[in-house]
Amino acid sequence: MLNKISLGGLILTLFIISSPAFAKDQTFTIVDTDQKACFDNTNLMDCPDSGQSFFGQDGQYKGNQPAYRDNGDGTITDLITGLMWVKARGSKVTWNSALAGAKDCNIGEYSDWRTPTIKELYSLIDFNGWLFDAKGAKPFINTKFFDFKYGNTNAGERDIDCQDWSSTKYVSKTMNSDPTVFGVNFADGRIKGYAIIKPRNRQKNKLYIRYVRGNTKYGQNKFVENINNKDKTVTDQATTLIWQKDDSGKTLNWEESLSYCEDLTFAGRSNWRLPNAKELQSIVDYSRSPATTSSAAINPIFNVTDKESYYWTSTTHLDGPCPKNAVYITFGRAKGYMKSPHSGQGKWLDVHGAGAQRSDPKSGDPSKFPNGHGPQGDDIRIYNYVRCVSGGKAIPDSPPTPTDFKASKSKRPSNVMQRQGGMNEKGNGQMQGQRQGQGQGGGMRQGPPAEALNACTGKSQGDNCSFTTPRGTMNGNCLQVGQDNQMACVPEGHGRRQ
């Protein structure tokens, strides 16, 4: 295969392989999130100095920078992880077809392709992405190297209906006992569990697949408890990251979480930081869950205050792209408040699986979200646990404030509604018909029609509703939408789910 690699590419490859990131024992090199800006609770900001509010966020630490090589044969090599990927987007397939199809893949004349694990797949995520509709969005993957396309709205899909399968099956089940597989949505920057069989029509769910080869040890942790001085830290020799064995013991909002780690002097170290999204996801143990092992989804070498806990990361999640949310990892069940369309009774369910990656408002009052948020009723906690990290490749950085960053509230289009994770709409989901990978595309006009508003007069959030249109009767749920959080009847299938 050397004849396929240019001299420059070969030199770059040799340079990276000889770098500390490719150390012999470091089989699980974490690629930086590539977030190069700083944010407060709601806006873009100049990166703060040590001791100031919001210091220590993702953009202020520079890790292993993403580096790819297009091999010119339909494959892309990740020069940091050592993984090789299929460049093309391909077509949507069932999960079983995704698994079986790897052996028939011969792209680049290789015969050892496999379906990626969730940790392998997540290595590709790039948190410079943001979500509008497809015309105003930026994918959470480097499209200079990887082919990508949003959902086909002309075929009734939503922009975000473009998730990728992994090979990682959830050890428990989601929703109403649905067998579930983890996947990454590179349109909105999330990990969620997706049902193998669509609950509404019992048809096999179809997502995209991108095969991988090389570095079969990627994603496998090698934890060693540092007991010589009983400092209660754990080193992952696969990543070279050093972790607190114990978590914060209490929940904090995002700003408090940044300060907690930056101010921490512990085990002879003062260089603790709040982990970024990829660092924290690296220690998820997808063989564990509260339902199957009576534990959080983490190696038992770590202590956990609450097995149903969510943990903050330092990474801002650009949903809109107003930077009101930050990424968290669910080490407990990723809960959502779901209402039955028949009885109207709601209950909390595991909607996305332990090990999902979602996002929370950075600040606010969680009591304002008694039924969660969005069509799947995502559990809004705002106050989450913290586990600080040290070591690895991350070095302090002070990136300049970008001048072309689209973070103005006024640039958020009003026709993109019910996107989980944002603050503009609150609501809850339904157990049937409001599930992963389902629903219709299209948006909404510059505000709900009067009929939709009137249909929810005197009703509560999540109640069933209906109103008459020229096309017939529309059934849905009462949800708060728009900048003014007006209560309106949102038709079934128009919720923006990930």
Image (cartoon, grey):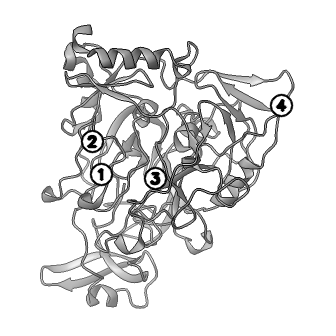
Residue linked to disc 1: 437
> Distance between the Cα atoms at labels 4 and 1?
45 Å
Residue linked to disc 4: 231
Residue 216, by quadrant, is top left
Relative horizontal placement of residue 232, taking residue 171 as reference (left or right): right
User: Which dot marks residue 351?
Assistant: 3
Decide: is 371 above or below 397. Answer: below
Question: Around disc 3, counting alpha carbons within 10 Å, would you say few (fewer than 14), some (14 to 19), or many (20 or more)?
Answer: many
Labels 3, 4: front one: 4
Q: What residue type is labelled 1?
A: Gly
> Distance between the Cα atoms at labels 1 and 2?
8 Å
Q: Earlier in the sequence, mark 1 or mark 2?
A: 2
Q: Which residue is drawn at 24% across and 52% down?
A: 201
Q: What element carries label 1?
A: loop
Residue linked to disc 2: 207
Decide: is 428 above or below 162. Answer: below
Look at the numbered discs 1 and 2 and tell me whether their residues touch, using CB distance below 8 Å: yes
Question: Around disc 4, counting alpha carbons within 10 Å, would you say few (fewer than 14), some (14 to 19), or many (20 or more)?
Answer: some
> Distance between the Cα atoms at labels 3 and 2?
18 Å
Relative horizontal placement of residue 229, taking residue 9 as reference (left or right): right
Question: Around disc 2, counting alpha carbons within 10 Å, would you say few (fewer than 14), some (14 to 19), or many (20 or more)?
Answer: many
